Amino acid sequence: MKPYEHIVKYYECDKMGIVHHSNYVRFMEEARVDWMDQLGYGFDRLEAEGVVSPVTAISCNYKSPSFFKDIISIDVKVSEMTALKISFSYTMKVNGKTVCLASSTHCFLENGKPVVMEQRFPELYQKVKVLDASE
């Protein structure tokens, strides 16, 4: 999968000119949405079929600051996929230097009830499992 690239906007920086830590969570979401689109199962497709994917856990480990106009390359990988949830890992780099290592976990719900992805979206589940095995 192709890494996602985010160009840091001025408003994403604090008074010191450093990207505010809270924005990395947004960058993760942008990268995750792009990853799903590349897979052919965008969140818009899942939501059109009545399935949502809320965040159940999130973690960020900041390694180095990033700044206005930096291009952050975000590599997204599946770190775990079970019948009911999926976990992603994110490696964010600027010019090859790691600025943040992060992870997020999500479940899938339909009408507020858990969805077993292998049953509800077997093609998506299989694609993710194949990717997971190849990484």
Image (cartoon, grey):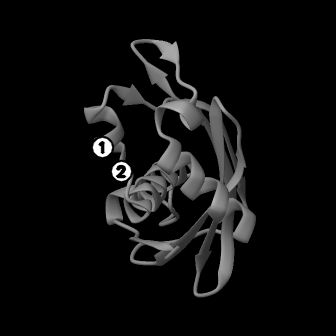
Q: Residues within 10 Å of mark 2 (few under 14, many from 20)?
A: some
- Residue located 41% across and 53% down the image: 33
How many angstroms separate mark 1 from mark 2 (CA)?
Answer: 5 Å
Looking at the image, the residue that sits furthest to the left is: 48
Is residue 40 or residue 112 the one in the foreground? 40
Is residue 14 or residue 130 the one in the foreground? 130
Identify whether 81 is placed above or below 119: below
Q: Position of residue 85 (x, y in %)?
A: 64, 34
Q: Position of residue 52 (x, y in %)?
A: 41, 29
Quadrant for the C terminus, please. bottom right
Q: Looking at the rendering, which quadrant does residue 98 occupy?
A: bottom right
Looking at the image, the residue that sits furthest to the bottom is: 95
Residue denoted by label 2: 42
Mark 1 and 2 residues: CB-CB less than 8 Å, in contact? yes
Q: Position of residue 53 (x, y in %)?
A: 47, 32
**Would residue 125 be found to the left or right of residue 47 on screen?**
right
Q: Residues within 10 Å of mark 1 (few under 14, many from 20)?
A: few
Identify whether 7 is placed above or below 31: below
